Image (cartoon, grey):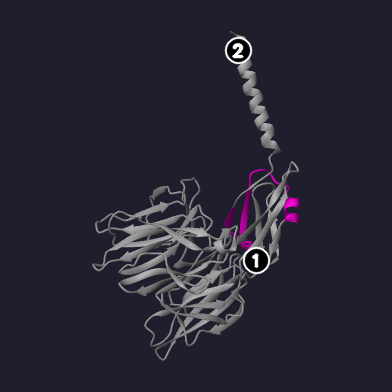
Amino acid sequence: MTRRPFLLMLMACAAVLAQHQLLLRRPPRLLRLVPQRVQSGSAALDLQFSRPMDRPRVIEATRMTPAVPHQWLGETTPLRMVIDADVVLTTPLELSIAGDGQRGLPLGEQQWWWDPRPWLIATRPVQGGEQVQLQTRSGEWMPISQVWHAILSVVPLGNGRGIALVERDQNGTERVWLDQLTPISTANRLATLGPPTLSSTEPLLKGEVLFAHLSSNLNGDLLVQSGGFQPGSDQVLLLQADGKRKALDLKPSGPMQLLPAGGGVVMPSYNGLSIRPLKATEQKPQMLPGSREVGAFCGASGRAVLIRHWPDYRRSIELVVAGQAPKQLHLGDQAVLGVACNNRGTQIWAVLGRWKQQRGNHELVLFSDAGDVTQRRALEPWTLKAGSPIQWNPVTKQLLMTLTRPNQTHARAGLIDGDSLKLIKVVNTPVSEAQWLSAG
């Protein structure tokens, strides 16, 4: 009776050892490709394998078409492929992935396609109200939201997996919605690549609100500031990319912005701007005094561009680097209508406005991080639509603006070369506002 349990135990151990040896002899597999947002390059892709890989062999055996400059990061798995920052991508990349695992077993060669170019989305006037639509690579427009009476603001999630919007009905009340999207930026066949698909639409808050402000970071987290019709009904809600919700005990004096890399938020107060962690820590908030507002974040590099308002009505543009005092790039009596910066914060674009004979006279200026003006160009006959953002696309090195001109009811989306500041294209479709949506 005592020998039988012992024999059963030996048989179980032998089976486990045999299974373990069998698994060790299995060749490595490519589990998934995960696009990443980085500041060091124009695009990045994580390759996750089932076994630790021999990185030199993967680098040697893997091919990319077109053969653009890139580098590899990581040791075993995942391995990250980073496209150099100066590369301009105009087509999808074909990847022939191969190599060996650390045990010398080969990875079967696999063909994949990757398109890191973002999508142009816009709020467009349609029958019955307004709708958020996406422009496909062929130039066609497809809806990615319902038709609403009026859309006040749209914020694409930083990971490309959705858009949040604030809509207003005929009675003037507002609601906040989330359209969840499924990106298709990687595929094993070129024909399978395409725009993201709309998977669901859901309300983010219960009932109607008096106002709402939205902000997202590169992780796909979403910050929702809202106020109800009753005193004390203001709330700040953090919706994390994993679906968790967290109410934040913050009392800002204006719209807050999530830090791109995650973990913190820029909160305006009556004394200036403060940077606060999203999780409770003993670290004191960092404070930047003065009448300032965040103009743009420079990717995940820890740099930001601020617009400062002076008592004599002048405006200045400041570059903020983590741990350093703000560096003034520009000071003048022109209105600063919008700013943007590249991922590393080495190029800063600004639209400056001066009114002349009751007509807007807008100028696009490119600054270096040292404050030197390296390029400038008048936008005439176009002007930047008031309150609309300037957005930088690191993959194609283009700026996106919402442009207007006299005697035109609706605006247009304008694409501008980031180095020469030449107007590449004006999309001849009426829009209320245009933005980039990450490929995901």
Which residue: 46% across, 67% down?
292
Chain part drawn in magenta: 33-61
Residue wearing tag 1: 85
Q: Can residue 183 be seen in this snapshot?
A: yes
* In the foreground, 377 or 400: 400
194 or 158, nearer to the observer: 194
Vertical placement of residue 197 versus 103, above or below: below
Residue that sits furthest to the bottom in the current view:
357
- Mark 1 lies on a secondary structure that is loop
Q: What element carries label 2?
A: helix
User: In the picture, residue 255 is in which quadrant?
Assistant: bottom left
The image shows residue 209 at horizontal and vertical percentages of 29, 60
Q: Residue at 69% of width from left, 46% of height from top?
A: 76
Q: Quadrant of residue 35?
A: bottom right
Asked whether residue 269 appears in the rendered view, the answer is no
Q: In this view, does 157 lie above or below 50?
A: below
Q: Cα distance, mark 1 to mark 2?
A: 66 Å
Residue 415 located within the stretch drawn in magenta: no
Q: In this view, does 130 lie to the left or right of 319?
A: left
Quarter the N terminus occupies: top right
